Image: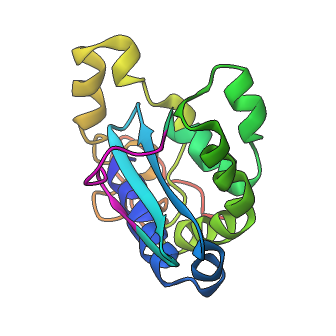
């Protein structure tokens, strides 16, 4: 799931940097948003500065104006319409720190970001049950080791070749073929 989510995020940040609507929105803005997925230990940022937008995996070069920390399922839900970001923040499922006024930038870009995330997710494939991932920050080093370990070959339709999509042709002596993807 981590590799698949990383591919989704990589496609997402690439789309952000080339999106005309977001570039137009960036005019007159100066804000850096830093997202951390606590359960997968993945991060990405987007920066609007002088009419340009920059986005990449990892941490920004300078401290961000807004830090957002959440589990992968919350980020995925925010950008697929299953999770309301404000309710997630009020319910403690999304932590926020930094400049509140600049954080509103995210809300103003939500529709464009959701469109780009969904395009990237469709290209990379469904990441699977993100809710099943243990949170490395909540459970300590044991959870981090669990997250880093790949799924056993043949489990849940994973053949070792396809990370994000169930394999419809894989069979093993101990299991039936997984159901076809819908």
Residue 100 colored in magenta in the image:
no
Q: Residue 122: x and y, percent? A: 58, 71
As drawn, 57 above or below 141: below
Residue at 62% over, 25% down: 93
Q: Is residue 121 visible?
A: yes
Q: Considering depth in this image, is 42 or 171 the residue closer to the camera?
A: 42
User: For the point 50% across and 53% down, which residue is it?
Assistant: 127
Q: Residue furthest top?
A: 139
Query: Which residues make up the magenta segment?
Result: 55-66
Total marks shown come to 0
Given residues 145 and 102, the one toward you in this image is 102
Left or right? Give the position of 18 relative to 57: right
Residue 7: percent from left, percent from top: 38, 64
**Residue 8 in the image: x percent, y percent?**
45, 63
Magenta span: predominant SS is loop
- The residue depicted at 63 percent of the width and 65 percent of the height is 113
Quadrant containing the C terminus is: bottom right
Q: How is the image coloured?
A: rainbow
Q: Is residue 50 above or below residue 136?
A: below
- Relative placement, left or right, of 26 versus 55 is right
Visible residue check, residue 167: no
Residue 50 screen position, x and y as percent? 48, 75
> Observer-nearest residue: 128 or 84?
84
């Amino acid at each position: 799931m981590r590799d698949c989510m990383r591919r989704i995020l990589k496609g997402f940040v690439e789309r952000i940097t080339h999106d005309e609507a977001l570039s137009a929105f960036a005019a007159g803005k100066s804000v850096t948003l830093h997202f951390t997925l606590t359960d997968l230990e993945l991060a990405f940022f987007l920066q609007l500065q002088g009419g340009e937008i920059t986005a990449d995996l990892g941490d920004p070069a300078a401290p961000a104006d807004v830090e957002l920390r959440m589990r992968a399922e919350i980020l995925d839900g925010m950008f697929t319409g299953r999770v309301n970001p404000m309710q997630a923040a009020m319910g403690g499922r999304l932590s926020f720190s930094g400049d509140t006024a600049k954080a509103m930038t995210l809300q103003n870009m939500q529709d464009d970001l959701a469109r780009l995330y969904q395009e990237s997710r469709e290209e990379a494939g469904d990441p699977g049950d993100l809710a099943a991932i243990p949170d490395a920050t909540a459970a300590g080093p044991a959870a981090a080791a669990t997250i880093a370990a790949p799924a056993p070959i043949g489990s849940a339709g994973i053949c070792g070749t396809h990370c994000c999509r169930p394999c419809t042709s894989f069979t093993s002596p101990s299991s039936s073929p997984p159901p076809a993807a819908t």
